[in-house]
Image (cartoon, grey):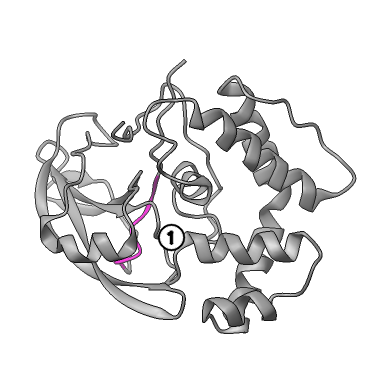
Amino acid sequence: MRMCGSVYARDPSRRSWSLCREGSKAVLPPVTILWPCPMSVGAYVQAGREIEVPRPDCPSCAAPMWWWSGYHRGVRQEGRCYRVFVPRARCRACRVSHALLPAFALVGRLDVVESVGAVIEEVASGGAGVRPPAERLGVPHTTARGWWRRFWQRAERLAVAFAALAVELGGEVVTPGRDLKAWVLSAMAAAWAAAVALPGWAALGGWRFVSVVSGGRLVSTNTDPLSIVVGKRRFMPPVP
């Protein structure tokens, strides 16, 4: 079975999600497409507008899309802020453009997913609260606390989703345990271990993998149902 990951979440650069209309034809709202970027943040910033991104098919009609400018957004890593370029692709048939967000970024969050993951892992292990890892990563402790609260609110759904994903990919079966924190991290680890055996995924890293298959919404503040997209649905494969 071949698994590649791309998940579609709403575009954080837009303020309104109501349907737009052009004449009598309704146009679907734009989405953010997470692509499996293995590059460091520094290398990505250096590439600027010349960044090479796999061109996706339209998430609505599956037609090939064309590049359509882009926008800049902030990303923070270990206390340092970067300005990264996020390219857009446009579907001529649907007349909608979609943002292509690199896997290290999260929808609606400034900090890279590795920082979020480091806080989650340390708090879940019971070693400390959010303040020590937040200080090491140069993140306000209130921000890190918000990550943990959002993650914990979704922990059971995440555990079920990633445990199912691990099985779907032919990996280890992770059964529920009394400790929900251990269960959700074990499920994520099992899904990642199974994905590593597939072409292109090993270079990504575990937390970027989690970001991609959760659509960048691991700790998003929106109320949309969390979805894990794999298998035969539309996705953007990593470059082996």
Asked if residue 73 lies left or right of residue 221, the reply is left
Residue 32 vs 230, above or below: the answer is below
Residue 7 vs 146, above or below: the answer is above
Taking the view exactly as shown, the residue that stands out farthest to the top is 1
Q: Does residue 221 appear in the picture of this structure? A: no
Which stretch appears magenta? 8-14
Residue shown at 73% from the left, 66% from the top: 123
Q: 220 and 139: which one is in front?
A: 139
Residue 68 vs 55, above or below: the answer is below
Residue 15 location, x and y as percent?
32, 69
Q: 169 and 161: which one is in front?
A: 169
Asked if residue 128 lies left or right of residue 75, the reply is right
Q: Amino acid at mark 1?
A: Leu
Residue shown at 77% from the left, 44% from the top: 183
Where does label 1 land, which residue? Answer: 106
Quarter of the figure with residue 152:
bottom right
